[in-house]
């Protein structure tokens, strides 16, 4: 996880939890004046628009005081959705046996994008199986990962 993301996660976990929700994860997409800070919140009963608005107000207040991002940005708060992104080893463990798409920062076996079933989680590494091929990736090399929903 990048330093800014670690700092933001530490800073925003408490205000999100104070509203009664879990901070599932966050993404900061830096693009000059068009940057986006995207928060994913979760709750066992789901997430409503009102919940997103409440968390947005609380988080905005903290961000205004702490001012951790020097450029202009838009704040987005949403549920992780059915194709939820995965950020931590605990989340990969929770979705063991599920199919995911993983995009890597640096290629592994000549590929940056992998799709497969999570078959093992060991500390900071995750093993995926796509058919008969298995690949183990280090979480710090994961640019993004999403669960593939089953209908």
Image: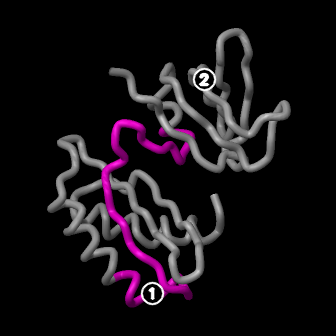
Q: Quadrant of the C terminus?
A: top left
Q: Is 78 contained in the magenta span? A: yes
Crowd class of label 1 (few under 14; some 14 to 19; many from 20; radius 10 Å): few
Asked if the residues shown at circle 2 and circle 1 are in contact, with their CB atoms under 8 angstroms apart, the answer is no
- At horizontal 31% and vertical 70% (from top left) the residue drawn is 15
Instruction: Name the residue tied to disc 1.
Output: 66
Is 5 left, or right, of 52 in this rendering?
Answer: right
In the image, is residue 116 above or below residue 67? above
Out of 107 and 98, give the one closest to the viewer. Answer: 107
Residue 149 occupies quadrant: top left
Scheme by which the image is coloured: one colour
Crowd class of label 2 (few under 14; some 14 to 19; many from 20; radius 10 Å): many
Local secondary structure at mark 1:
helix
Give the percent coordinates (x, y) of residue 63: 40, 82
Give the percent coordinates (x, y) of residue 68: 52, 83
Q: CA distance from mark 2 to mark 1?
A: 40 Å
Label at residue 126: none
Local secondary structure at mark 2:
strand
Q: Is 131 contained in the magenta span? A: no
Residue 77 occupies quadrant: bottom left
- At horizontal 63% and vertical 58% (from top left) the residue drawn is 1
Label tally: 2
- At horizontal 80% and vertical 41% (from top left) the residue drawn is 107
Residue 31 occupies quadrant: bottom right
Give the percent coordinates (x, y) of residue 18: 25, 66
- At horizontal 43% and vertical 63% (from top left) the residue drawn is 38
Residue interval drawn in magenta: 62-91
In the image, is residue 106 above or below residue 135? below
Is 70 left, or right, of 148 in this rendering?
Answer: right
Label at residue 116: 2
Out of 76 and 14, give the one closest to the viewer. Answer: 76
């Amino acid at each position: 996880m990048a330093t800014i993301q670690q700092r933001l996660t530490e800073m925003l976990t408490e205000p999100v939890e104070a509203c009664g929700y879990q901070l599932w994860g966050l993404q900061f997409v830096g693009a000059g004046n068009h940057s986006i800070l995207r928060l994913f919140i979760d709750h066992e009963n789901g997430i409503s628009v009102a919940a997103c608005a409440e968390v947005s107000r609380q988080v905005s207040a903290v961000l205004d005081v702490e001012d951790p991002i020097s450029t202009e940005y838009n704040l987005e708060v949403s549920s992780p959705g059915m194709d939820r992104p995965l950020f931590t080893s605990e989340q990969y463990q929770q979705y063991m046996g599920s199919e995911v798409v993983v995009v890597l920062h640096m290629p592994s076996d000549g590929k940056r994008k992998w799709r497969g079933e999570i078959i093992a989680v060991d500390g900071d590494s995750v093993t995926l199986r796509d058919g008969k091929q298995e690949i183990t990736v280090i979480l710090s090399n994961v640019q993004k990962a999403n669960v593939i929903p089953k209908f």
